[in-house]
Amino acid sequence: MIQFVQSFESEWLKRKRSLASWLVICGAFFTPLVITVAKIVRHGALAASSRLPNYWEALWKSSWESMAIFLLPLGAILASSLITQLEFKNNTWKLLHTTPQRYGVIFLAKLSVILVMMLQFLILFNIGIYLSGVLPGLLFGVSYPAEPIPVTYFMTENGRYFLACLPIIALQYLISLQFKNFLVPVGIGLVLWILSVAVLSWPYGHWIPYTYCSFNYLKDGPKFTHAFPLITFALGYFLLFTVTAYILYLQRKEKG
Amino acid sequence: MEQSYILETRALGHRFTDGAAVLNDICLQVPERSVYGFLGANGAGKTTTLRLVLGLLEKQQGEILLFGQPFGRNRLQALQRIGAMIESPSLYGHLTATENLLVLQKIYGCPKERIALVLEMVGLSATGSKKAARFSLGMKQRLSIAMALLHEPSLLILDEPTNGLDPNGMIEVRELLLSLNRKHGITIVISSHLLGEIEKMVSHVGIIHSGSLLFQGTLAELQQQRSAGGRLSLYTDDQSKTTSVLRAMNIQATFDGGKFTMPMPQQEMIAALAKELIGSGVSLYELSPAGNDLEAIFMDMITH
């Protein structure tokens, strides 16, 4: 356990100033910023909307619209690939593999950094949603929203989105560990994401592991007909991809 | 008493996936506290051997022992005591020198004070917030050495560590390595094709060519072995008269490139030859041992 913590700290340090760490911050605040600007432009409607009984749920829904379908899957694809590619880009696999660490610890520490970055992304996104909900009102002297923040609903949905993007992270991690060329994992990720958008209305679309963020957003919609255990599917794929990634990682004949 | 080796390989062999042999029966024996020069031209198999020793390549044939224990079963314990730099520097370009060392400090759990110490050792204390990607090749090379030294290893494995360094940098690195060996007893394995550079710091030598170990022993043994089969070079102003003198003294010599070369005669015979040549009116420009420096020995070994 101590070795894992040491390894995680080391991996966490590597992401400092990396493109992936900037992506997390910029990606998390992008949609809230757009919503804030839109509210400022249409500030005449602020007073009426702040009195709505479902103010926060409506804001949550509009914030997640682009996030669930575009930004979260693409962010997961890019962040997973960028973090893993740090070793290829810097020619440091040989450095990492000559440190006294078990291969399993290296594998898990790297994956954990990506997962913690996704959590970081969700936390920042939630802060962004909150700010986009209160800042325009404060600027134009509109009273604080009447509805209390539905914390339980937000937390549950955050948890579901986090689990829904796990298969993307695991498969991107698997691919990124195998290919030196950064374009390979990103290219495969983009193709799978485009495919996932295309199959959303297909009855078997839920078998494509990149669809779950979108399905989680669409699940409350009137036209949603996919009755499947989303969390079970997501966790199943995550476990499958993670175990496969580890086996392939262990079997690499050249470790740097 | 049996010599103890800090690093030993037994019949180490390796083949590429197409079946071509890269290493044949390599039996390295690196004594404790030695500076072992692993010499060979580019592509001779030096890096492959060192990558096998460090577990970066999957072992196919033979045995690897580090600190007297088989490497496979004791990988973590062995790596805890090894500092390594293989081929080009491995650094995180977006991090500073201190941050690069911090990445390793977290893993090894060594005191943070070591970071400033090793940066001082390699002359990189003043790099501040400069990112490693903006370092010159020489600075990168020195930072890699600092990273290999961070956890106070007992064995340092350096693959071409002076590549990219200017002559002054080479001297600095050489002095640093020699001081580490003498003051701290660190065993150093250093591979290179820069033979003149190696000659000035090693106590033991292994020469590899086309995947086979041609020689292994102390530097003195190598020079002794080769001087036994050494040659004498003779350069005069008169080929014909010189040939006559050599015949008269029953010395077998060959003439090539304006010079005579012959098997190294006894010291008395060399003096007599010089006296005879001068007595015959031949101007003697040069009478010197040929091919006793490491460069010549190395070239002779790999070409014969």
Image (cartoon, grey):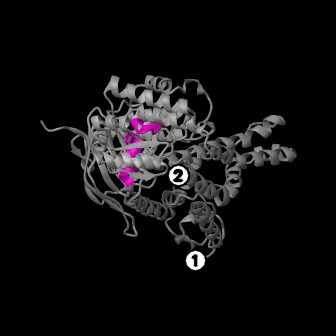
Quadrant of the drawing holding the N terminus of chain A = top left
Q: Nearer the viewer, residue A214 or B28?
A: B28
Count of marks, rendered view = 2
Up the image or down, B63 lies above or below B112; here it is: below
Residue situated in front as seen by the camera: B37 or B262: B262
Image quadrant assignment for residue B25: bottom left
Crowd rating for badge 1 (residues with CA inside 10 Å; few <14, some 14–19, many 20+): few
The magenta stretch is B278-302
Q: Does the magenta segment cover residue A217?
A: no
Residue at the (84%, 47%) spot, across then down: A45
Which label sits in the foreground, 2 or 1? Answer: 2
- The residue carrying mark 1 is A203
- Parent chain of label 1: A
Q: What number is the disc on residue A88?
A: 2
Note whether residue B234 is visible: yes
x%, y% of residue A60? 67, 51
| Category of crowding for the residue at label 2, using alpha-carbon neighbours closer than 10 angstroms: few (below 14), some (14–19), many (at least 20) | some
SS class, disc 1: loop
Mark 2 secondary-structure assignment: helix
Q: Residue at x 31, y 33 (%)?
A: B154
Q: Distance between the residues labelled 2 and 1?
A: 39 Å
The x and y percentages for residue A183 are 61, 60
Mark 1 and mark 2 in contact (Cβ < 8 Å)?
no
Residue B291, magenta (yes or no): yes
The percent position of residue A200, horizontal first and vertical second, equals: 62, 71
Residue A47, position in %: x, y? 82, 43
Q: Can residue B156 be seen in this view?
A: no
**Residue placed at 77% from the left, 48% from the top?**
A34
Classify residue A133 as left or right of residue A22. Answer: right
